[in-house]
Image: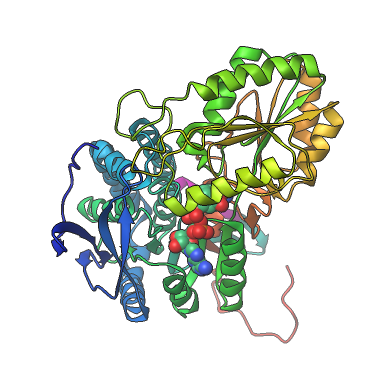
Amino acid sequence: MAALLYHPYTALTKGRRLVRQIPHFIHGKSLQLADRLHPVSSPATGEVVAEVNMADEATVNQAVASAQSAFSSWSATPTPKRAGLLFQLRELIKKHRKELALLITQEHGKTLNDAGASIDRGLEVLSYATGITDHLMGQYASGIATGTDNYAIRQPLGVCVGITPFNFPAMIGLWMFPLAIACGNTFILKPSEKDPSAMLRLAELAVEAGIPDGVVNVVHGDGETVNHLLQHKDIKAVSFVGSSAVARQIYQTGIAAGKRVQAFGGAKNHCIILPDADIDRTAETLVGAAYGSAGERCMALPVAVLTGGDTFADELAASIAERVKALRIGPGDADNIDMGPLISREHREKVFAYIDAGIKEGAALTVDGRTLHADKKGFFMGGCLFDHVTPEMTVWREEIFGPVLCLMRSPDFATSLQWINQHGYGNGSAIFTRNPALARRFVEEVQTGMVGVNIPIPVPIASLSFGGWKQSRIGDIHLFGPEGVQFYTQLKTIMQRWPDEPTAGGFLLPTH
Ligand code: NAD
């Protein structure tokens, strides 16, 4: 792995090795409180590369106090000025793109190109946030009674929190905090403890861009830290992205504590492939979508339903298998790599256990990558391919979140659609066909929040909003775009009259 460009923190002596310490970032300052320390490993080497501070209640209180103290002047800052500071931040992130990508690759394991692309997708939402003056334009109804006008504005909530998963160490934070602060809120990020450095660097860049101290803070930690955040009376809203079980728990706890919560959970995205789709092109697309980032994407495509006959399905399955065997696997910072390691040894064990379950329940493991790269020190594995998967199997029902593609064989379009719609997750789905009528029917009838037509990973642009259905989203408002603005603001309606003489009071309900 190439040397990191960025070594800002105190190196501590641990045994005979130097270990970087990753601090919190509160009110514009790095704080190494060492409440508890948690090791951060390089998935490519298996070695501990840093230790992250884990926030206890006192640290959480300090971060909330910082964000609360910054709120009154930040929310009163004119929107074009807030937008101007976000423009500066966008330029700084672009300037530091390579350094951020390296931090992501070192702690997550994904390829450098993929890490760079995730920063770009995060910047799209930041760019959307720079249009905040337009997004916050209200509504005005003039002359609704004699000399009386009624109008509506949206105002910020206060201190908001973003809790993010390991698989996108920078992008998902960028989907949250720029829009939240553009709306006038202040923010506390709680990144995954598995790969926390990129988010910390983003918060530092925010201050370097001129965003006042306390507007963007980072506290590190795990479930314990999150519970302190969820119980804090001064936190008004929580955005969460991660697994469905934690999403449900955070939603329930946050709502019970009187907060606004949006919680995005796990996924098991399907595509239907009809026999009129081009075999080679579809196989190529599918392998990229299933194995990119080692399958650790909420919008990965781990299930393909081959629809309409065994001749076509056999040919497509063979073409996919050939490509899976040829995947180039290695450290994310090496050249010409398709896929890096998994996030941790424990996660790889979990993926292996799913593969055992698939074999036991009767699926055909046509490519077995479990022992590939077993000689390497990191958390590598090769791609695995199951054929003849059915809806009774664990590998179909549950999210594996690894480099494992499940092929199902379906006799017709209606059966394929029914399988997707009966699944517990509903993040994304796709159809590959040249038949516009069936594609339209799919778009209308499929029960997922994001749909691709001949597009495998249909993550919407920033001016639309992101989110799945069913167990993939708990709560009713999607991330970023217009729904993001709605989430991070509250509505106020104003009725005004400027009479020449003060209006006499009355005992009747005012009418127009
Ligand atoms: P996770 O649920 O384990 O952790 C997510 C975040 O919650 C982390 O910051 C973690 O520290 C915190 N956390 C963990 N346990 C907690 C607990 N008991 N109480 C409170 N907080 C807790 O998820 P992960 O393994 O980091 O990420 C992978 C999951 O995220 C997958 O299920 C994936 O599908 C999902 N994901 C979903 C989306 C989406 O948009 N729907 C996007 C990316 C990832």
Q: Is residue 36 above or below residue 344?
A: below
Q: Nearer the viewer, residue 422 or 44?
A: 44
Report whether residue 240 is seen.
no
Q: Nearer the viewer, residue 336 or 6?
A: 336
Check if residue 439 falls in the magenta segment: no
Q: Position of residue 338 (x, y in %)?
A: 42, 27
Could you tell whether 50 is left or right of 351 in the image? left
The total number of labels drawn is 0
Residue drawn where x is 72% and y is 36% of the image: 363
Tell me the quarter of the image containing the N terminus. top left
Q: Position of residue 500 (x, y in %)?
A: 54, 72
Q: Is residue 163 above or below residue 102?
A: below
The quarter of the displayed image where residue 151 is located: bottom right
Residue drawn where x is 53% and y is 45% of the image: 481
The quarter of the displayed image where residue 192 is located: bottom left
Q: Is residue 218 above or below residue 125?
A: below
Q: Position of residue 14 (x, y in %)?
A: 17, 63
Could you tell whether 127 is left or right of 9 in the image? right
Q: Which residues are magenta?
A: 133-140
Residue drawn where x is 80% and y is 23% of the image: 438
Report whether residue 452 is seen.
yes
Check if residue 136 falls in the magenta segment: yes
Tell me the quarter of the image containing the C terminus. bottom right
Q: Nearer the viewer, residue 507 or 321?
A: 321
Could you tell whether 128 is left or right of 436 in the image? left
